[in-house]
Amino acid sequence: MQTSKTLRLHHVNSTEAFAELVAALAANGMAVLEVATHHIGQRNIYRDVTVSVPAESDLETLLTTVRLLPGIIVESVVDEVLRVHEGGKMVHRGRFEVTTFAQLREVYTPGVAKVCKEIQADPELARRYTNAGNTVAVVSNGTRVLGLGDIGPLACLPVMEAKAMFYSQLVGLNAVPLVLEAKGVEEFIETVERLAVGFAAIHLEDIQTPGCIEIERRLEARLPIPVMHDDQHGTAVVTLAAVHNLLRLAGRELSEICFAQVGLGAAGLAIALLVKAAGGARVLGCDRSESAQVLARAAGVECVEFDEAIARADVLCMTTGKSGLLAPERVRNGQIILALSNPAPEIEPADALNAGAAAALDGRSVNNLLAYPGLFRGAIDARSRAITTLMKLRAAEAIAACANADEILPDPLGRQPHRAVADAVRQAALESS
């Protein structure tokens, strides 16, 4: 997986020395991303040079390449991924600073007692006077994190922090990352049920299958606030948005094509069911797990073998976690390929296109960041008790509509897609109430 390293170095004060460095890096498949010059002396120039490296294993190649150049001394190497996570990514602070004794009496004792009594008399006022009306709990037990598997709650905390920080940036919600020492379904549900009183919604993340499905189902039934497992439904919403636009560019309709979902785990099953709910008349599912097949068939998904899925699918979507699963020679001419496993897809998009695919995307392009902030913002604003199928369908349509004519999906860091999703979800909730 591509990474970036910053070389803290100095070289002789000549344009030729730096030009040789850039050329040597390029010759080894590495590009200079950024250069920060700290000091220019009579003899040496001191710089931080950030370099794109194809993979972590190529670090020694990078260092050897640079050290062989005359006049260049590498002082240290900084891993940019680790650097940006130092100290964590979340900061919790008050909305304003208390600077006077009068403010202290209002914010804290004795004034705060008045607010406590108001909420005691009418618990709904907690939404107005506390964080409980505007804060999402991002909860995981670390049992299925990215492509890393069961790495435990502490090791998954960087992911939960990343999920949480985007709520504030993109839709103005507070979010708190919570990691639990609770591998069992019952223990997890009980813990979340007890802490949920202080939150407006529960965002479930990185929980192993099939436990995640049961956890979500039972928490939805027990809690009066929205609960959603993002790995299932956030992924499904953004995948459906991509399918809408891929078919639009191909001049086809979802109701007339065959959609095959290979891998019916948490994300795959949710994708298949949402595509079917969106009007997919022919939705195939493929998975070796009998329990996954039972769930799929119960929702009207036809289960087939892998070879048949490839042969029949106009749109082939894969969420198997198996890198290289689809050989290029098996791609049918004009087929649309979604190889969504991270960090390594079932087939590289470039290979699929070279083999004749009409379009191909991987998990880096289909980013569920486009879905979950707006889904929760809209549901919370509408005071909805749940995130419904209608909300997810409207969210997918909103995301697709925000893409430019030459895009499949919009920029996940742009504000407009998230506002559009929140508005669409809120409207869907109002229509259903």
Image (cartoon, grey):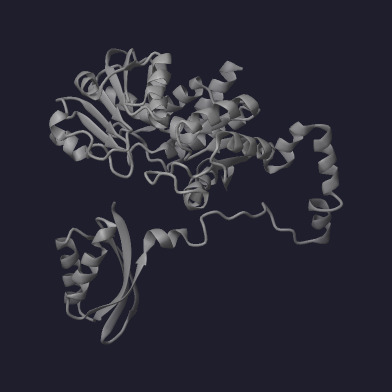
Which of the 4 image quarters holds residue 305?
top left
Answer above or below: position of 137 versus 256: below
Of the pair 419 and 309, the residue shown nearer to us: 309
| Quadrant where the image shows the C terminus | top right
Identify which residue is drawn at 29% across, 16% down.
253
Identify which residue is drawn at 34% across, 34% down: 409
Horizontal side of 188 relative to 233 (left or right) equals: right
**Residue 81, position in %: x, y?**
39, 58
Q: Quadrant of residue 45?
A: bottom left
In the rendered image, residue 315, in percent from the top left (x then y), is placed at 26, 24
Residue 358, percent across and down?
Answer: 19, 28
| Total numbered circles | 0
| Left or right, 264 with reference to 96 | left
Give the x, y percent position of residue 178: 58, 46
Q: Is residue 223 visible?
A: yes
Question: Position of 61 compared to 380: left or right?
Answer: left
State whether residue 199 appears in this view. Answer: no
Which residue is rendered at x = 23% and y = 81% of the image? 13
Q: Nearer the viewer, residue 343 or 80?
A: 343
Could you tell whether 31 is left or right of 263 in the image?
A: left
242 or 283: nearer the eye? 283
Residue at image coords 69%, 54%? 96
Q: Nearer the viewer, residue 3 or 327?
A: 327
* Residue 14 vertical placement versus 334 (above, below): below
- Compared to residue 256, the image places residue 61 above or below, namely below
